[in-house]
Image: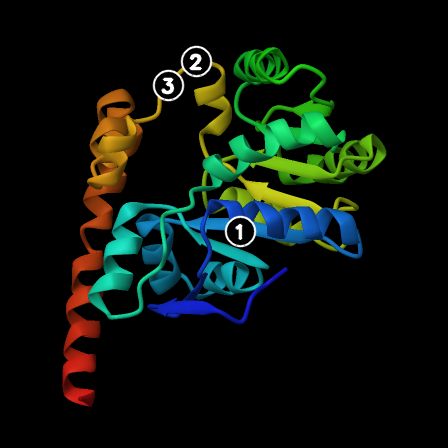
Amino acid sequence: MSTTDRVDLFGCPFDRVDLQQAVAQVEVAIAQRGRLTQSVGVNLDQLLKMQEDPAFREIILQCDQITADGQPIIWLSRLFGDPLPERVPSVDIMEALLPLAARKAYKIFLLGTKQELLDRAADAMRQKHPGLPIVGQRNGYFKEEDEPEIVRQINESGADMLFVAISSPKKEQFVERNRAALQVPFVMGVGGAFDIAAGQYTRAPRLVQKVGLEWAWRVAQEPKRMGPRVLHDLKFGKYVAREALRRARSR
């Protein structure tokens, strides 16, 4: 699934793919069923975590598919002369996979968010994609000692795809701890996708996403959670300045 055509930004190798190519790679992973294949969408917040937390960085580097989950990543790739084709958020990959799953009977397990929102999200997905085989669901409120039972549920469901809607880095850590035990061909963290599907929040319009202001849209809806994160992400400016200086000296 992983490609040799990657763009390295601050030590993170992003796949040079558009949405259609990313979805095609997932289909190959499901067809092969040889081992667990993990996809991750890396945004600016996660890229900053990779600089600050070596353990988190190693988890991300193990992923088979790494896509640019945010317009600032695209801008950085252009700034440093190795442009990525487009932003490919994990939620977009999930939304593209749902109709495919309904047509091809790919079985889906949903893990994450509050139980009420999870139920609403699953119902909304089935209504939008008739015949969608959601074979299991579990809310995201659990302790580490509960994970063996959750993994058993996932494995017994026979799921082809596991979507994990838990905040980062918890979702990546969950997969890392249970990588050897999970018997599912494809797993991907999808952030707040279930909350969006449930109607709890809305995604920014495409134009807002394209001009890089999706963060402002999210802050307006979740100020207590997203406000501090945006302020923390401003620290990334020092890494951009450092990298620009390094490249200027190497010329």
Other residues around mark 2 within 10 Å, as few (<14) / some (14–19) / many (≥20)? some
Decide if residue 22 is on the left or right side of residue 133. left
Residue 223: mark in rendering: none
**Residue 206, position as x, y percentages in the image:** 29, 31
Q: Which residue is at the front of the view, 143 or 54?
A: 54
Q: Which residue is at the front of the view, 107 or 210?
A: 210
Q: Which of the two discs, 1 and 3, sits closer to the camera?
A: 1
The disc, 2 or 1, on the residue closer to the chain's N-terminal end is 1
> Do the numbered discs 3 and 2 sit on residues whose CB atoms are within 8 Å?
no
Q: Secondary structure at mark 2?
A: loop
- Using the numbered discs, state the Cα–Cα distance from disc 2 to disc 1 in whole angstroms: 28 Å
Q: Which of the two discs, 2 and 1, sits closer to the camera?
A: 1
Label 1 belongs to which residue?
Answer: 21
Q: Is residue 107 visible?
A: no
Please name the residue shown 19% across and 43% down the image: 231
Residue 199: mark in rendering: 2
> Do the numbered discs 1 and 3 sit on residues whose CB atoms are within 8 Å?
no
Q: Secondary structure at mark 3?
A: loop
Dot 1 amino acid type: Gln
> Do the numbered discs 2 and 1 sit on residues whose CB atoms are within 8 Å?
no
Other residues around mark 1 within 10 Å, as few (<14) / some (14–19) / many (≥20)? few
Dot 2 amino acid type: Gly
Q: Quadrant of residue 225?
A: top left
- Using the numbered discs, state the Cα–Cα distance from disc 1 to disc 3 in whole angstroms: 28 Å
Please name the residue shown 35% across and 57% down the image: 47
- Using the numbered discs, state the Cα–Cα distance from disc 3 to disc 2 in whole angstroms: 5 Å
Q: Give the number of marks.
A: 3
Dot 3 amino acid type: Tyr
**Residue 83, position as x, y percentages in the image:** 31, 63
Q: Quadrant of residue 220?
A: top left
Decide if residue 208 is on the left or right side of residue 82. left
Label 3 belongs to which residue?
Answer: 201
